[in-house]
Amino acid sequence: MFSGRKIVLSEEDLPTKWYNILPDLPEKLPPPLHPETKEPLRPEDLEPIFAKELIKQEVSEERWIKIPEEVREVYKLWRPTPLIRAKRLEEALKTPARIYYKYEGVSPPGSHKPNTAVAQAYYNAKEGIERLTTETGAGQWGSALSFATKLFDIKCTVYMVKISYKQKPYRRILMETWGGEVIPSPSDRTKSGRTILERDPDNPGSLGIAISEAVEDAATHENTKYALGSVLNHVLMHQTVIGLEVMKQLEIAEEKPDVMIGCVGGGSNFAGFCYPFVRDAMKGEVKLIAVEPEACPTFTKGDYRYDFGDTAGLTPLLKMFTLGHDFIPPPIHAGGLRYHGDAPTMSLLVKHGIIEAKAVKQIPTFEAGVLFARTEGIVPAPESNHAIRVAIDEALKAKESGEEKVIVFNLSGHGYFDLSAYDDFLYGRLRNA
Ligand SMILES: *Cc1c(COP(=O)(O)O)cnc(C)c1O
């Protein structure tokens, strides 16, 4: 049994290939549909907004896809990331369970998001693209893309959900420090933004609206493409470096996971962490739990059907769990989890019962995050607190039953730019939505 504190891999252990879940799904993934014709999308329909290589990856049926050396070189700035045994948390809970967390907060922007931002910036730069547009909620994705585009010398325009733009100025400053241009959304830069502002000048924005603006900007400008931070197959695949590292690290620790837990906004950190273990989950060897906020309960209360990825209905229709593309979630602090839909591959796995979904309220997630900070030291992102909440609940269940469970969760990012959310919690201003 592992008695150390953390498992650190060397740079040579950094994965050389990404894992693609498509060939291992229990049924064929329903195809995306064209937003106007409602016919299955042809790859070339995506060319106005995405780099060709990324479209190829989006529909690829190959199980393993080589990570370009240029991308691995950038990954080495912070990868491999550590897998850490949360011993002090175990002791505080008096649980016989062993709790491990994969820490993705060591990247420069402080989350898992650069794992795909770097890959997307690389392929776009290689194809001669000069500017990428995107949306951001809490600012995590926008800062990851601002960082990544700078490394490959392309420009970045970020439409940031207005409520977060106001609540979280430090992320905006971070994006601008890396050279990104940040626009509060809805804005008057695009037709979709102007339409919403005419009806509702005080609209707080949502990820769905910001996506409409970023896609429209890319589609209407030369040499400009769009980058999405979650949901799509290629994005989730880029994130699998997380789970592939975890596999090696657990082998070194001589541990087999009983439960693996991640939070879900669109599904990318969860998928990156868990997809390499899906074949084990299908054999019933490990339980995979996806955690979402009760304020945005896509898996637990949504329907499995075709829906748009954005508010204006410009994106292809995806078969996924959805709360409806016009759903605007309450302004909880876990901005990265305020999305109406979920990744199609993950939706399929939830429908088949291979991934279990749970929804949790906001205050218990902060209670979990503060206990984690007071035992393990790291102040987690409000999104990651959702995973910690359920990891703690599982550890408490193990305490009741006296089982020596191995619980592994993904600490998707740190919360040092979210301290005002902690302030609201500590001073009783947080709503339990
Ligand atoms: C963006 C974000 C999430 C949610 O997005 P996914 O695509 O579901 O991973 C979770 N945690 C952190 C720290 C984030 O930045």
Image (cartoon, helix red, strand yellow):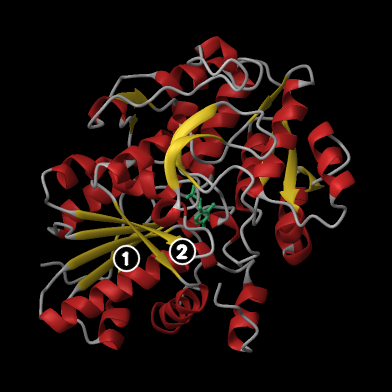
- What amino acid does circle 1 point to? Ile
Q: Earlier in the sequence, mark 1 or mark 2?
A: 1
Residue depicted at x 30% and y 51%: 9
Q: In the picture, which quadrant includes the N terminus?
A: bottom left
Residue 103 screen position, x and y as percent: 41, 60
For residue 363, side relative to residue 163 (left or right): left
Q: Compared with residue 51, is residue 404 higher up or lower down, i.e. above or below?
A: below
Measured from the top left, where is residue 85 in percent x and y?
A: 28, 69
- Which of the 4 quarters of the picture holds residue 16? top left
Residue 365 appears left or right of 191: left
Question: Label 1 to label 2, Cα distance in Å?
Answer: 15 Å
Relative depth, front residue between 392 and 213: 213
User: Would residue 7 be visible to someone looking at this image?
Assistant: yes
Mark carried by residue 384: 2
Give the residue drawn at x 56%, y 40%.
229
Residue located beneath label 1 in the image: 84
Q: Residues within 10 Å of mark 1 (few under 14, many from 20)?
A: some
**Image-based side of 69 in relation to 248, left or right:** right
Label 2 sits on a secondary structure element that is helix
Q: Are marks 1 and 2 in contact (CB under 8 Å)?
A: no
Query: For the residue marked with disc 2, what is the amino acid?
Result: Ser
In the displayed structure, 211 sits above or below 250; it is: above
What is the crowding at mark 2: few (fewer than 14 residues within 10 Å), some, or many (at least 20)?
many
Position of the C terminus, as image quadrant, is bottom right
Q: Quadrant of residue 28?
A: top left
The yes-or-no answer for disc 2 within 8 Å of ligand 1 is yes
